[in-house]
């Protein structure tokens, strides 16, 4: 089985044989997810509570990570912002994975004109920049999380569908498929009961890598003011809001969400690629 995960350009390929690094990244991912789930109970303040008297204050006993230019607690906004920052990429990955698997299965299993039609269509989508598509849709429907999530999900679909198609073509050549066909099983039964479970680990590894990239893209849109509304805590939006603080010599409120974004993207990338490498060794 071919198990090459499609890696996007623009970010270094983080491949390592170091088990400690993999465990560290996996632990960091678990920590971020746990912090997002427990954010309402962990956040010491309301993320939108304003205290102008403490604006741009540094770390202290009352505000462990300081206060931004609007007088809002940075730690609280980071914790609550983790929910939005992870929810958007989750929507992108969920939609693109489900739709990509359906398109890849249909193209790889049926072949012929259907394969040609679906392949050419996904190639057109693949050639169109996802960020540009998201900007166009947001400019039409206004700010919010739904529009960029749908746009990026469509842009990420070809990565999953092309990988799924190649895996399905490899599975079709295996003897067990012919054996089930002789037994009278339909193509749908074979795909759902046998082909899909066999290719699922590789596709999920691709989706894990895509999660990190989707997080980065959505944070970029929020930084441009095209993502979540202004008062919604979000890591990308926090970087945007922290620009004025940087100009005034207080960079902490902008640096911290940047660090969260970078570390989370790297962690998901390492976990996804290590998962893909492990599957490749098991299925040469």
Image: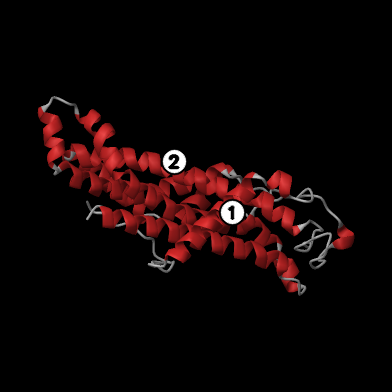
Viewport quadrant of the C terminus: bottom left
Tell me residue 42's x, y (percent).
72, 49
Position of 179 with respect to 217 (left or right) is left
Front residue of 185 and 166: 185
On residue 95, which mark appears? 2
> Could you tell me which residue is drawn at 68 percent across and 55 percent down?
78
Label 1 crowding class (10 Å Cα cut-off): few <14, some 14-19, many 20+?
Answer: few
Give the distance between the C-alpha atoms of the residues marked 1 and 2, in whole angstroms.
24 Å
Front residue of this view, candidates 182 and 142: 182
**Numbered label attached to residue 165:** none
Please name whichever residue, 132 or 76, is drawn nearer the observer in this view of the structure: 76
Residue most toward the front?
Answer: 20
The local secondary structure at tag 2 comes to: helix
Residue at figure coordinates x 24%, y 41% from the top left: 107
Residue at 68% from the left image edge and 58% from the top image edge: 238
Residue 143 image point, x, y percent:
61, 47
In the image, farthest residue toward the bottom = 249
**Residue 146 location, x and y as percent?**
55, 42
Location of mark 1 (residue):
31
| Farthest right residue in view | 53
Per the image, label 1 sits on a secondary structure element best described as: helix
**Mark sitting earlier along the chain (1/2):** 1
Q: Give the mark count.
A: 2
Q: Residue at the spot x=16%, y=40% of the render?
A: 112
230 left or right of 264 in image: right
Whether residue 113 is visible here, answered yes or no, is yes
């Amino acid at each position: 089985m071919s198990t090459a995960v499609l890696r996007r350009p623009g970010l270094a390929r983080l491949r390592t044989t170091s088990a400690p690094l993999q465990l560290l990244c996996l632990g960091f991912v678990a920590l971020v997810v746990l912090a997002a789930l427990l954010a309402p109970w962990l956040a010491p303040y309301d993320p939108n509570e304003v205290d102008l008297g403490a604006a741009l204050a540094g770390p202290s006993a009352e505000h462990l990570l300081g206060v931004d230019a609007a007088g809002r607690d940075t730690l609280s906004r980071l914790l609550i912002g983790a929910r939005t920052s992870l929810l958007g990429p989750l929507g992108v990955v969920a939609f693109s994975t489900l739709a990509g698997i359906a398109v890849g299965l249909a193209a790889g299993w049926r072949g012929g004109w259907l394969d040609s039609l679906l392949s050419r269509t996904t190639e057109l989508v693949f050639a169109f920049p996802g960020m540009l598509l998201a900007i166009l849709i947001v400019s039409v429907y206004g700010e919010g999380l739904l529009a960029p999530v749908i746009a990026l999900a469509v842009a990420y679909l070809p990565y999953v569908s092309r990988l799924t198609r190649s895996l399905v073509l490899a599975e079709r050549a295996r003897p067990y498929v012919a054996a089930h066909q002789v037994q009278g099983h339909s193509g749908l039964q074979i795909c759902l009961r046998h082909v899909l479970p066999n290719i699922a680990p590789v596709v999920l590894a691709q989706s894990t890598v895509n999660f990190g990239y989707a997080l980065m893209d959505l944070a970029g849109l929020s930084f441009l003011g095209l993502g979540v509304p202004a008062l919604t805590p979000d890591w990308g939006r926090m970087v945007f809001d922290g620009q004025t603080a940087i100009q005034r010599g207080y960079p902490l409120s902008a640096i911290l969400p940047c660090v969260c974004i970078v570390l989370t993207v790297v962690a998901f990338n390492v976990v996804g690629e290590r998962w893909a490498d492990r599957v490749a060794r098991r299925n040469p």
